[in-house]
Image: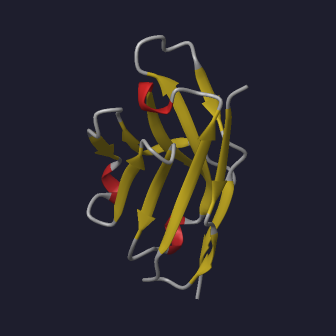
Amino acid sequence: QAKLVESGGGSVQPGGSLRLSCAASGIIFHLYDMGWYRQAPGKERELVARITGSNNTTYTDSVKGRFTMSRDNVKDTAYLQMNNLKPEDTASYYCHAQHSFFTNYRYWGQGTQVTVSS
């Protein structure tokens, strides 16, 4: 059974850094595109970053130059390095996996909270 487990969230001051991890199990990891989404209270869930199995990455405009997504296909883990964090980055962050070919195979993690506040 597929499972995604996020970790690394927490509380930081503006300008600080966090590294989120998403450990996958029960899937053939390198066949999945991985994504990080976030949802702030009262707002819709939005895609923050995405990485394909071949390491092509895309980012939403608000995080370009500050966030870096990567993956380790040996450890079956995806990462989101977040630098120069801003209060508007405060949200619950969710890991998402979608099969590169059979796109109906999609899975979500349980989420991890990121709070940026002085």
x and y percentages locating residue 116 in the rendered image: 57, 76
- Would residue 41 be found to the left or right of residue 73 on screen? right
x and y percentages locating residue 92 in the rendered image: 65, 55
Q: What residue is drawn where x is 42% and y is 41%? A: 73
x and y percentages locating residue 41 in the rendered image: 69, 55
Q: What residue is drawn where x is 63% and y is 29%? A: 107
Q: Is residue 44 visible?
A: no
Which corner quadrant of the image does residue 112 belong to? Answer: bottom right
Q: Nearer the viewer, residue 5 or 103?
A: 5
Q: Is residue 90 visible?
A: yes
- As drawn, 42 above or below 87: above
- Would residue 61 be found to the left or right of residue 76 on screen? left
Q: What residue is drawn where x is 58% and y is 88%? A: 118
Residue placed farthest to the bottom in the image? 118
- As drawn, 24 above or below 65: above
x and y percentages locating residue 114 in the rendered image: 62, 66
Q: Nearer the viewer, residue 94 or 40?
A: 94
Q: Quadrant of the N terminus?
A: top right
